[in-house]
Image (cartoon, grey):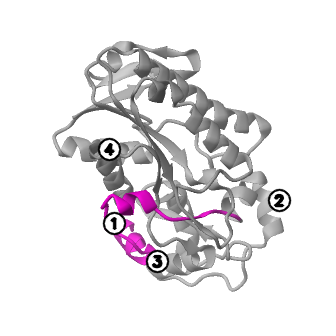
Amino acid sequence: MTTVVTGSSGLLGTALVSALRAEGHEVRRLVRRAPAGPDECFWDPEGDVLDPAALEGADAVVHLAGAGIGERRWTEAYKRELVNSRVSGTHILAAAMARAERGPRVLLSSSAIGFYGDTGDRAVDESAPAGTGFLADLARAWEAATAPAEEAGVRVTLLRSGMVLSGRGGALARLLPIFKMGAGAVLGSGRQYVSWISLPDWVDAVRFLLAHELAGPVNLTAPEPVTNAEYTAALAEAVRRPTMPLPAPRFALRLALGEFAEEALLAGPRVLPRRLLDAGHRFAHPTVGEALAAVL
């Protein structure tokens, strides 16, 4: 296959590009700087610049680009950046795919389990409706931006990813130094759910979806979500260090991190990967203990 990848320099994109090339597939990377080689093509989603030649003759697009959810405090300006970096870029890419005469007929477009909002103890799969809150609104608009490609007959698969576990980046890598010092702690009540997936399983799931005719939303999460208290205990065990005896209080997290803490740390959906399991996909790391052992 020839696959076009956006966001290829990030944690997920780097791992996916490496896996695809290791299998002998051709990968073209859409980059926002001057191309450094024949496998790179320039695009500027903010300026609505995408050369149709970047898509010609390709089989599929995996769209991963977007500003990091947890990289900065959610000011109103940064929330607009989060929306624009996802919605505008996705729409430009989908519209270009719709116009291309010999373009890709498959689009795997990033989304997130934030679509479901906070579900408490209730487990949800892809049949669940959208929740409420900024993350849910963002995911809904992000997914809707793929409409031009879908209307043109492109198979659109929406990658509703959970927290991806990797020691090389993402939320886990930021927590590791804290836990290695023995300063890890349960967040708030600890009863909120963490729906996670190991980086190797995330890559395998995307490869599976490139090869199988699944359209619409697909949850990229492991089959056993855990509470924050369970996740904290598993991570402490993985690094062989104790945790703090008292939880990090809700008010302190809200004061330090604002709206991000309320939506992304102190609440969350309990998500099941129903469509992947029903399609026959199997996870290498179905439990959080196995996942942490593998990625650390």
Q: Closer to the N terminus: mark 2 or mark 3?
A: 3
Q: Indicate whether 285 appears above or below 32.
A: below
In the picture, the quarter occupied by the N terminus is top left
Instruction: Please give the residue where the numbered disc 4 appears in the rendered image.
Output: 213
Q: Which mark is residue 255?
A: 2
On the image, the x and y values in percent for residue 89 come to 54, 27
* Amino acid, disc 4: Glu
* Amino acid, disc 1: Phe
Q: Indicate whether 36 appears above or below 15.
A: above
- Dot 4 falls on a residue whose secondary structure is loop
**Magenta region: which residues?**
267-296
Observer-side mark, 2 or 4, equals 4
- Dot 3 falls on a residue whose secondary structure is helix
Q: Closer to the N terminus: mark 1 or mark 2?
A: 2
Instruction: Please give the residue where the numbered disc 1 appears in the rendered image.
Output: 283
Count every numbered label the image shows and give the total: 4
Q: Label 2 vs label 4: CA separation?
A: 45 Å
**Pointer 4 with pointer 1, Cβ within 8 A:** no
Q: Label 1 vs label 3: CA separation?
A: 23 Å
User: Front-most of 98 and 61?
Assistant: 98
* Amino acid, disc 3: Val
